[in-house]
Amino acid sequence: MLIENTKEKEKYFEPIKQCFLFKDVEEETVSKILSDERLKYAVFEKNNCIYSYKSFEKSLGIILKGKISVNKYKENGEVLINYLKTGNAFGGAAVFSKSERYIAELRAETKCVILFVSDEVLKDMFRISEKTMLNYMTYLSDSLVFLNKRLDIFSAGNAEERIKEYIRINAAPNGEGIYELTIQSYSRLAEYLSIGRASLYRILDDFKAQGLIDKSGKKIYIKGELK
């Protein structure tokens, strides 16, 4: 469902201004860009398909409200690639691509409001503000870094090696200099790593018994050779 009411659109102007695309861009320039009537605001209900492999927009999507999942479909079922939340963007690599197939399927995990910025609007935006173009290039580069990390995890080998690689990549030092990782959901992590939940728990318990990690609730603390 599209949002047509101008007042309703204006409610999202402040979140849009915080988007990576407008980082360090002058307020006047941002306001001019947001006045473009070609910008499309869309509402998706929970579980709605936002993009499929064959049906997608040649646009940059910016999540103004809600959470979406990025999924791949294989012969043995669905593989979770990532979650995107308010302020995140998607579709940037496909905007100027000639491919007629999208790389994944995107599903609304909650009710979502998404701003679609078409290729033509982006071209005009880059002409108005070189900074928006540089911000867009940074976003694309960061997306490639994420994909490379994902490949590192899945090329690591068996389930144990994938879990080790995931922990290595995502753990960060806390205030005490100890590398730690917060798991939002063990079920979602198992899905993300394409392993069973029971296997995930068993392997983490094995790592703890081997002295590789400490585990307390949703916190994992790295020890030993995992560093």
Image (cartoon, helix red, strand yellow):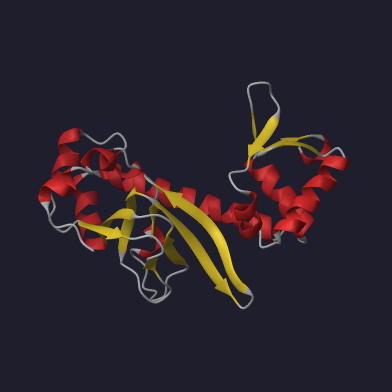
Residue sitting at x 24%, y 38%: 14
How many discs appear?
0
Is 15 rendered above or below residue 196? Answer: above
Residue sitting at x 38%, y 46%: 86
Tell me: 95 left or right of 123. Answer: right
Tell me: 167 left or right of 82. Answer: right
Of residues 161 and 41, which is closer to you in this image?
41
Residue sitting at x 34%, y 70%: 56
Residue 105, position in %: x, y? 45, 68
Of residues 159 and 43, which is closer to you in this image?
43
Is 141 rendered above or below residue 226? Answer: below
Which image quadrant is residue 1 in?
bottom left
Point out the residue furthest to the top here: 176
Tell me: 191 left or right of 52. Answer: right
Residue 6, position in %: x, y? 11, 50
Is 59 rendered above or below residue 76? Answer: above
Residue 139, position in %: x, y? 41, 48
Residue 124, position in %: x, y? 19, 54
Tell me: 42 left or right of 176. Answer: left
